[in-house]
Amino acid sequence: MLNKSRWVEIMKAAGLTDENMKNWHQQFEAMEPEAHQAFLESLGIDAEEIKTIRHWAQA
């Protein structure tokens, strides 16, 4: 099962920096907010952290 830490490892192994990952979240949130929510839930992230991530992605 894919979780948050494994997903971050994969993204970093693919060469994404923290700034690239923030941009990825921002684009996902802007283009498909409901899918972004579902994706974050699928990683096993709790509701409070999802709220934080989505707020961060909207900044």
Image (cartoon, rainbow, N blue to C red):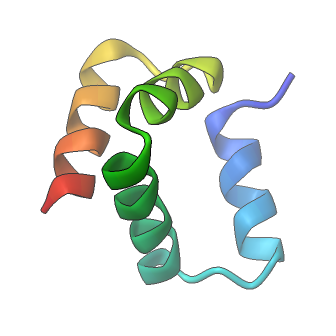
Q: Residue at x 41, y 62 (%)?
A: 27
Work out whether 59 lies above or below 29: below
Q: Nearer the viewer, residue 37 or 52?
A: 37
Residue 21 image position (x, y, % from top left): 51, 69
Report the residue that reaches farthest toward the front.
31
| Number of numbered discs overlaid on the protein picture | 0
Q: Quadrant of the C terminus?
A: bottom left
Residue 46 image position (x, y, % from top left): 41, 16
Work out whether 30 lies above or below 24: above
Residue 47 image position (x, y, % from top left): 32, 14
Q: Residue at x 72, y 48 (%)?
A: 7
Work out whether 16 lies above or below 1: below
Work out whether 42 lies above or below 23: above
Q: Residue at x 76, y 45 (%)?
A: 6
Side (left or right) of 3 relative to 30: right
Side (left or right) of 14 relative to 34: right
Q: Residue at x 66, y 44 (%)?
A: 5
Residue 17 image position (x, y, % from top left): 56, 83
Q: Quadrant of the N terminus?
A: top right
Q: Nearer the viewer, residue 33 or 18?
A: 33
Side (left or right) of 53 relative to 18: left
